[in-house]
Amino acid sequence: MNEERRIEVEQVEAVTPPPRARVESPAETFERKRDYLTGFLAGETETALPAGNEELKERVIEALKSIYDPEIPVDIYELGLIYDVDISEDGDAVVTMTLTTPHCPVAESMPQEVELRVLGVLGIRDAEVKLVWEPPWDPAKMSDEARLELGML
């Protein structure tokens, strides 16, 4: 009784990604206490929610300025790796960034580090990092502070 088993396979063009997990806001958790590690890892002692999106965006940028490229002694924001920071009314952050090269040794870990640091900012409900390669990074994207630090000015 050797019955042949067949597995049916269906070809599809694309698969819809599953929904992203959401981090609840303090209002949604009824004054739940902040995780003590969040403030510790971010080195912050803030307790008040930001007044608006611009203040929240500034806090996110400050968090990004605490991440340094492992090969260059300059933070990723001043290095010009962050192309855009967008904060929704609900506190969802989308960070568009690149790396100095696709073969960068931190290509896998850097976007995760950015996401974790942004999620550590009080008032951020969710964070998404979009890693892009267009336009490609070049030294012209560095701030004057970064160029000064690297002796390029």
Image: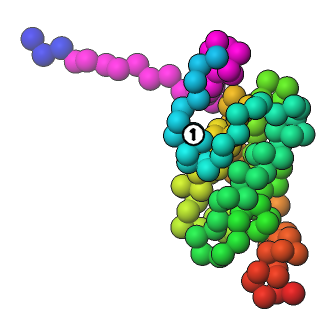
- Residue 150, percent across and down? 75, 83
Name the chief secondary structure element in magenta: loop
Residue 9: image quadrant is top left
Residue 55 within the magenta-colored segment of the rendering = no
Q: Is residue 12 left or right of residue 121?
A: left
- Whether residue 128 is visible here, answered yes or no, is no
Q: Secondary structure at mark 1?
A: helix
Three-letter amino acid code at the position of disc 1: Thr
Q: Which residue is mark 1?
A: 38
- Residue 133, percent across and down? 74, 58
- Residue 72, percent across and down? 65, 76
- Whether residue 20 is visible here, answered yes or no, is yes
Residue 17 within the magenta-colored segment of the rendering = yes
Residue sitting nearer the eye, 134 or 99: 99
Q: Which residues are magenta?
A: 4-30
Residue sitting nearer the eye, 32 or 72: 32
| Vertical arrangement, residue 146 with respect to residue 48, above or below | below
| Vertical arrangement, residue 145 with respect to residue 130, above or below | below
- Residue 49, percent across and down? 77, 30
